[in-house]
Amino acid sequence: MPLPMVHLAIAVRTHELIGSELTPAFLLGSIAPDAIHMRPNTTRNDKQKTHLLPDASDPKDQHIGRLLDRYRARGPKAIDFAEGYAAHILVDRAWTETVLESLRRQLPAAMPHAELRSLYYQESDQVDFDLYHKAPWRPAVWGLLAQAQPIDFEPLLAADEIARWRDRTLNWFESLKQEPMIEPAYITAVLVQAFVLEMANMLAPYLREWKQRHISS
């Protein structure tokens, strides 16, 4: 799945397209599903739950609609957070179907999973560091994220888990300093920039509809 800077880049561009103000709550929601990594002894099944992976009997995207309906009555910050969360889910699905699938096709079928995983995270980590260093919106987004107030997002995540993931994201690039220092060969800057633009164009109509429903409810 894409790492935080890609999700944040998509959030910024989507709001530019619809001419709407980017809020701390939406930004926090857009990285929040991965806060499951802050839970001790978490499993793959836990991540599948926080990422709302539907079963075969669930029509496409209805699970996301139910999530938004649950939080629509809880005020602007809660629904902004939920909309950011929903955007993350849709972006992850598209990333798996496009970027990740493209990577797999270019690599030997016999490559061990551990080796593929290492390559993937080296390249996607570098993508995030490059965005951190170069994106003109990054300082403003960091300021907004620092203001964001985590909420208990029942039944998926606790506010404390979300807060710790936000703080980890804010500190990752400077304090932890784990930049791979490579030139990605597969998950390139050009590929990621195209993905960001494609996802923003895909999400813009969703976000307009979600916000209109919030206004009319």
Image (cartoon, rainbow, N blue to C red):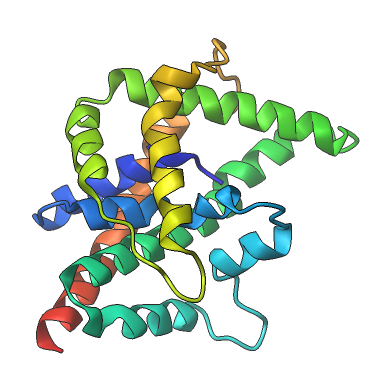
Residue displayed at 53% across by 49% down:
95
Give the residue at x 56% y 42%: 99
Q: Residue at x 22, y 75 (%)?
A: 209
Q: Position of residue 204 (x, y in %)?
A: 24, 61
The quarter in which the C terminus is drawn is bottom left
- In the displayed structure, 54 sits above or below 30; it is below
In the figure, 4 relative to 130: above or below? below
Residue 118 spot, x, y in % from top left: 72, 28
For residue 83, above or below residue 96 = below
The quarter of the displayed image where residue 214 is located: bottom left
Q: Nearer the viewer, residue 185 or 172?
A: 172
Residue 4 left/right relative to 107: left
Closer-to-camera residue (205/28): 28
In the shown orientation, is residue 118 left or right of residue 1? right
Residue 129 coordinates in the image, percent (x, y): 43, 22
Q: Residue at x 48, y 54 (%)?
A: 161
Farthest residue to the top: give it. Answer: 181
**Is residue 187 visible in the rendered structure shown here?**
no
Number of numbered callouts drawn: 0
Residue at the extreme right of the image, as rendered: 110
Between residue 146 and residue 85, name the one nearer to us: 146
Q: Nearer the viewer, residue 199 or 105?
A: 199
Residue 208 drawn above or below residue 1: below
Quarter occupied by residue 107: top right
- The answer to whether any part of residue 204 appears in the image is yes
